Amino acid sequence: MNVYDDEWNLLKKVQQLDFVVVELTLYTDTHPDDEDARNQWRNAIKEAARVRRHYESKYGPLSLTSVPSKQAIEVGWQWNSPPWPWQR
């Protein structure tokens, strides 16, 4: 097993859940009375957020909006600071 397998599998899960959220959003836009779809959408959003937080706690932020506000404002986010992904 490659040392990056866990990271890639977790990132793949984030991407899959983000896709589900987008698809369910589009579906519920055209089927606003489908309560089952709305519940699936709510659950998908919660699960996507949970998996994203887990990924970011282990491997770092996925986007600028994931950087803690206080850190970004006071010291700035330093994308070029070690460790690099291949140094972990």
Image (cartoon, rainbow, N blue to C red):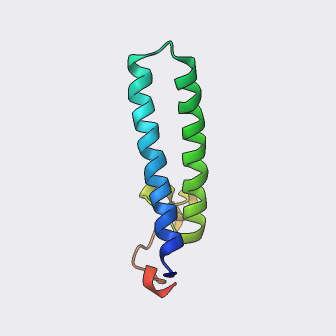
Residue located at (57% from left, 22% from top): 36
* 73, 54: nearer the viewer: 54
For the residue pair 11 and 59, the one nearer the viewer reads as 11
Going 60% across and 60% down the picture, which residue do you hit?
A: 54
Of all residues shown, which one is farthest toward the top? Answer: 33
| Front-most of residues 42 and 63 | 42
Q: Nearer the viewer, residue 45 or 13?
A: 13
Q: Looking at the image, which residue is at 43% across and 58% down?
A: 64
* Residue at screen point 48% across, 81% down: 2
Q: How many marks?
A: 0
User: From this viewpoint, is residue 12 visible?
Assistant: yes
Residue 42: x and y in percent read 58, 32
User: Farthest bottom residue?
Assistant: 87
The outermost residue toward the front is 1
Residue 23 in the image, given as x and y percentages of width and height: 40, 34
Pinpoint residue 68: horizontal percent, then vertical percent. 55, 59
- In x, y percent, where is residue 84? 44, 82
Using the image, determine if residue 34 lies above or below residue 59.
Answer: above
Residue 6 shown left or right of residue 31 in the figure: right
Viewer can see residue 61: no
State whether residue 3 is above or below residue 47: below
Left or right: 41 in relation to 84: right
